[in-house]
Image: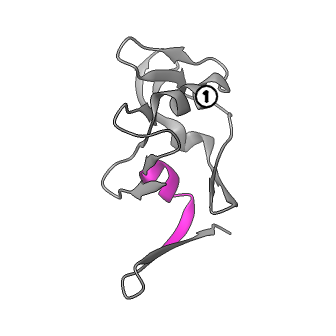
Amino acid sequence: MGIIDTGTSALYMHPLDALAIHSAISGVVELTDDSYAIPCVTQSKLSITINGFPFDVDPRDIVANPIGSGICYSSIVSDPERRPGEMVIGTAFLKNVYFTLDVTRDRIGFAKLR
């Protein structure tokens, strides 16, 4: 389950989900405030599957503000208010897809970028 939030740049998820994703990123550092730092030029791939359809996220979009020499905050944020498998999906994901809002049918659609 996910919440679409065009007002945030990050992907907020349960701490165990964030840990699982960050464990696959080379050079990751867990910071003391449950956030993560990753190399600013990471090539690690992230794919988010929605209703059985995988959507790739450009590695540059999981990199947030720089912390220091070649290290940046991760856009994948640990959020203890989220349940496992639940995410708040921000522009780090949304800029990698086309999405439509159908208010008459109360649904959202996604398509891969060309």
Residue 100 at least partly seen = no
Q: Residue at x 67, y 21 (%)?
A: 26
Q: Looking at this view, name the residue that lies furthest to the top.
A: 32
When asked about the image quadrant of residue 60, the answer is top right
Q: Is residue 89 shown left or right of residue 25?
A: left
Q: Position of residue 100 (x, y in %)?
A: 47, 76
Q: Which residue is mark 1?
A: 20
Q: Residue at x 62, y 17 (%)?
A: 27
Amino acid at pointer 1: Ala
The local secondary structure at tag 1 comes to helix
Please state which of residues 3 and 29 is positioned toward the viewer in this rendering. 3
Q: Is residue 62 shown left or right of residue 106?
A: right
Query: Tag count in the figure?
Result: 1
Quick one: quadrant of the C terminus?
A: bottom right
How many residues crowd around disc 1 within 10 Å: few (fewer than 14), some, or many (20 or more)? Answer: few
Q: Looking at the image, what colour scheme do you see?
A: one colour
Q: Is residue 90 magenta?
A: yes
Q: Residue at x 45, y 34 (%)?
A: 14
Classify 35 as above or below 47: above
Q: Looking at this view, name the residue that lies furthest to the bottom.
A: 104
Q: Is residue 106 magenta?
A: no
Q: Is residue 76 shown left or right of residue 57?
A: left
Q: Position of residue 30 (x, y in %)?
A: 49, 15
Classify 1 as above or below 40: below
When asked about the image quadrant of residue 103, the answer is bottom left
Please state which of residues 73 and 32 is positioned toward the viewer in this rendering. 32
Classify 114 as above or below 61: below
Residue range of the region highlighted in magenta in the rendering:
89-99
Q: Looking at this view, name the residue that lies furthest to the front.
A: 83
Residue 17 at least partly seen = yes
